Image (cartoon, coloured by chain):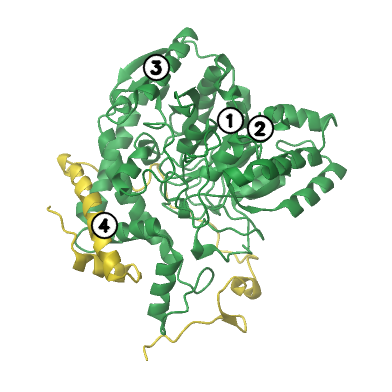
Chain colours: A green, B yellow
C-alpha cells in the first residue's frame, strides 16, 4: 500500500501527529517515479533536488495548514518561478527561468505543498491524447498501449500511477475531465472565473480554467478550496466568497433532481459507456435522487462553435511568440519579419499551427461575421440551454467522453474525428459552468469510464456533494492500475 | 456561404499569422481547413438573427484599479530569457529588408 492510498485529510492528520514526515511523502513520490516513470512518461521536468531540500526544511518547521507538505505535480502550461515551463513546445523549450508564479502556484506555495515536477501535455493544451507534446507521448497507466487523454494527460496519468498525490491541470474544452475519465481519477473544471488564470499560459482566454486532478472527490474539494478565489491580476476572476467545499460533502442527495440530456447518449457514444452511466443513475435512485431525460437542443452545434472560437482566441494568444523576448528563435531569415515567420514555423508543432491558421482565417476580413460572430451567437444558445435546464434541475449528468481511451497513434490523422472526443465536455466550457468527471465503471478491456456531473455557475459545492455521494456508494475509485514492476 | 478555402487563401492567411509554410504544407492545410469549415456550415442551420453574441459567460463589467507604480521586474530580469540580448536590450535582426 502506498501512502497515496490515504486521503489528503488523513495525510494531513498523520503529518500533524508525526506518524509520517514530509520527507516520507516526497520519497513516496520520487520512489514511485523511479519505479514507473519509464513506462508512463508523465513528466517533462522533475525537480527532485529542490523537493527533497524543501521536505527537510518543512519537517524542521512543521505548520498546520491545508495541503502542507503534500507532493504535487503541475501541468507545464502553469508558470512556476525559476522552474522551466515549456507548454510541451519547442517554442518554450528554453524557457528555463520564469519570472513569477501563477496565482494557483503562489497559493499552493503559501500552504507549503511540495512541487515534484512539471507534467506533460499536448502542446499549448491543444489535443486530446497528449500525443502532440514536443517531447513524448504519455501512456495510460491502465494500459500503456493507450493514451491517457489530453491535454492534461501527464497530470491525470501521474495521479493514477501514484507518482504524485494530486496535480493541477487546465481545461479549455475538456482537458481536465477527459484525461481524468480515461485514467480513472477525479477531475474538476471549475466555473469560469472561479480560479485565477494569472500565470496560466493562455490558449483561449474566454474558456480556459485551472482545476485539480485527484484520486477522490473529497481530495478534489480540498484542493479547490485552496486554489479558488479572487485575484485582481485576472480581470475575469470572480469576486465571490469560496465555500468550504469539504464541509458540504454530506452524502445527502435525497430529493436531488438530475437532468440527463438525451443528446449525450447519441451517435458515437459506445454501449459500454452508456451502460456504465445508466448504472450510475440507478445508484442515485437508490440514494433518493430522481432523474429525468431532458434536451439540450443545441449540443450538436457545440463542437463547430468551439473550434471556431477557441482557434480564433488561440491565434491571438499565440501571437506573442515572436522570438524576441523569450522562447525559440530561428537562425534562418535575415530581416525581422522573416525571423518571426521562421521562428514560429519551426517552434510550433503541426496541431498548433493548424489552429492558428483556422483562427486567423475566421478572424480575417470578410469572414469574421460568417464564422466568428456566428459561433459567438451559437454560444449564447448553448449557454441558454443550460440556464433553462438549471431552472428545474440541480445538476446535469452524462458520460464525460463518448468512448474509453483510444490507442496511441489511432486518431491523429483526421482532425474532425480527433476533435469529436471532446463533444460531451465542450458545451460546459462554452456555457462556463462547472463540470467534474469521476470514475463510474470499466470497459471489458479494463479501461476506466467517467461520469460527468455538471452544475450551475459557481455551484461547485453541489457538484462535489453529488459526486461524493456516488463515490461513497461505489468502489470504482479504489481500483488501481497494474503498471507492472512493484505496482499493486 | 460555399467553401471559401483555397490554396491562395491559405498562403494569405499564413502571411497574416506570420507563419512560413511550404507548398506541400499549404496543400495539406487547404484540405484540413476545408474539412473543418465544411463541418462548421452546420451552424448555418440556426437562425441567429435575433441572438446576441456571447464573448464572456459571466456578467462582467470593466475592472478598474488605481494607477499606482509597483515593483514588478527589473530590466535585467526582463531580458534574461531572451534568445539574444545586449546591454539590457533585446537584440533583433534588421527591421528593413536588405
Q: Which quadrant does the N terminus of chain A fall into?
A: top right
Residue contact at pointers 1 and 2, CB within 8 angstroms: yes
Q: Which chain letter goes with mark 4?
A: A
Q: Which residue is identified by label 2?
A: A487
Q: Are marks 3 and 1 on the same chain?
A: yes
The nearer-to-camera label among 4 and 2 is: 2
Report which quarter residue B83 is drawn in: bottom right
Res A467 visible: yes
In the image, is residue A421 above or below residue A310? above
> Of marks 1 and 2, which one's residue comes earlier in the chain?
1
The nearer-to-camera label among 3 and 2 is: 2
Q: Secondary structure at mark 3?
A: helix
Q: Which residue is identified by label 4?
A: A362
The nearer-to-camera label among 3 and 1 is: 1
Q: CA distance from mark 3 to mark 4?
A: 40 Å
Q: Which residue is identified by label 1?
A: A481
Q: Which residue is identified by label 3?
A: A278
Side (left or right) of B37 relative to A289: left
Viewer-side residue, A320 vs A451: A451
Q: CA distance from mark 1 to mark 2?
A: 8 Å
Viewer-side residue, A60 vs B50: A60
The local crowd at label 2, few if under 14, some if 14 to 19, many if 20 or more residues have their Cα within 10 Å, is some
The nearer-to-camera label among 3 and 4 is: 3
Amino acid at each position: 500500500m502506498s501512502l497515496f492510498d490515504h486521503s489528503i485529510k488523513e495525510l494531513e492528520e498523520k503529518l500533524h501527529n508525526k506518524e509520517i514526515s514530509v520527507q516520507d511523502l516526497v520519497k513516496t513520490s520520487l520512489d514511485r517515479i523511479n519505479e514507473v516513470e519509464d513506462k508512463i512518461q508523465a513528466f517533462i521536468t522533475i525537480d527532485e533536488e529542490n523537493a527533497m531540500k524543501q521536505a527537510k526544511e518543512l519537517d524542521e518547521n512543521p505548520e498546520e495548514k491545508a495541503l502542507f507538505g503534500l507532493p504535487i505535480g503541475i501541468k507545464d502550461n502553469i508558470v512556476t518561478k525559476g522552474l522551466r515551463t515549456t507548454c510541451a513546445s519547442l517554442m518554450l523549450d528554453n524557457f528555463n527561468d520564469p519570472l513569477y508564479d501563477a496565482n494557483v502556484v503562489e497559493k499552493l506555495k503559501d500552504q507549503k505543498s511540495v512541487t515534484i515536477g512539471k507534467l506533460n501535455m499536448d502542446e499549448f493544451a491543444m489535443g486530446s491524447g497528449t500525443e502532440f507534446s514536443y517531447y513524448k507521448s504519455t501512456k495510460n497507466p491502465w494500459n500503456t498501449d493507450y493514451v491517457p487523454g489530453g491535454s492534461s494527460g501527464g497530470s491525470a496519468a501521474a495521479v493514477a500511477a501514484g507518482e504524485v498525490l494530486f496535480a493541477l491541470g487546465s481545461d479549455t474544452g475538456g482537458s481536465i475531465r477527459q484525461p481524468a475519465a480515461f485514467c480513472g481519477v477525479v477531475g474538476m473544471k471549475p466555473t469560469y472565473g472561479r480560479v485565477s488564470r494569472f500565470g496560466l499560459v493562455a490558449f483561449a482566454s474566454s474558456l480556459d480554467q485551472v482545476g485539480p486532478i485527484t484520486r477522490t472527490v473529497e481530495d478534489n474539494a480540498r484542493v479547490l478550496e485552496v486554489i479558488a478565489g479572487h485575484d485582481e491580476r485576472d480581470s475575469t476572476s470572480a469576486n465571490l466568497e469560496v465555500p468550504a467545499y469539504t464541509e458540504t460533502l454530506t452524502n445527502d442527495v435525497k430529493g436531488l433532481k438530475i437532468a440527463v440530456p438525451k443528446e449525450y447518449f447519441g451517435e458515437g457514444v459506445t454501449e459500454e459507456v452508456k451502460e456504465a452511466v445508466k448504472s450510475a443513475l440507478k445508484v442515485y435512485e437508490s440514494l433518493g435522487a430522481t432523474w429525468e431525460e431532458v434536451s439540450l437542443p443545441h449540443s450538436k452545434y457545440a463542437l463547430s462553435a468551439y473550434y471556431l472560437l477557441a482557434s480564433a482566441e488561440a491565434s491571438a494568444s499565440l501571437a506573442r511568440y515572436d522570438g524576441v523576448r523569450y522562447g525559440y528563435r530561428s537562425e534562418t531569415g535575415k530581416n525581422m519579419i522573416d525571423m518571426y515567420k521562421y521562428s514560429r514555423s519551426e517552434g510550433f508543432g503541426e496541431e498548433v499551427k493548424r489552429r492558428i491558421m483556422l483562427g486567423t482565417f475566421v478572424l480575417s476580413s470578410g469572414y469574421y461575421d460568417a464564422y466568428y460572430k456566428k459561433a459567438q451567437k451559437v454560444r449564447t444558445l448553448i449557454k441558454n440551454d443550460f440556464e433553462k435546464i438549471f431552472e428545474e434541475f440541480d445538476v446535469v449528468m452524462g458520460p464525460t467522453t463518448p468512448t474509453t481511451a483510444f490507442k496511441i497513434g489511432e486518431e491523429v490523422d483526421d482532425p474532425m474525428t480527433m476533435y469529436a472526443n471532446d463533444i460531451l465536455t465542450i458545451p460546459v466550457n462554452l456555457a462556463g459552468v462547472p463540470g467534474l468527471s469521476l470514475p463510474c465503471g470499466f470497459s471489458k478491456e479494463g479501461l476506466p469510464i467517467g461520469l460527468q456531473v455538471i452544475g450551475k455557475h459557481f455551484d461547485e459545492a453541489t457538484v462535489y456533494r453529488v459526486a461524493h455521494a456516488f463515490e461513497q456508494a461505489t468502489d470504482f475509485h479504489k481500483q488501481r492500475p497494474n503498471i507492472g514492476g512493484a505496482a499493486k | 456561404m460555399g467553401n471559401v478555402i483555397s490554396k491562395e487563401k491559405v498562403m494569405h492567411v499564413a502571411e497574416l499569422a506570420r507563419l512560413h509554410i511550404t507548398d506541400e504544407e499549404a496543400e495539406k492545410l487547404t484540405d484540413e481547413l476545408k474539412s473543418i469549415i465544411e463541418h462548421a456550415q452546420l451552424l448555418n442551420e440556426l437562425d441567429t438573427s435575433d441572438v446576441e453574441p456571447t464573448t464572456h459567460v459571466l456578467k462582467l463589467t470593466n475592472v478598474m484599479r488605481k494607477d499606482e507604480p509597483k515593483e514588478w521586474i527589473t530590466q535585467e530580469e526582463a531580458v534574461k530569457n531572451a534568445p539574444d540580448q545586449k546591454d539590457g536590450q533585446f537584440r533583433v535582426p534588421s527591421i528593413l529588408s536588405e
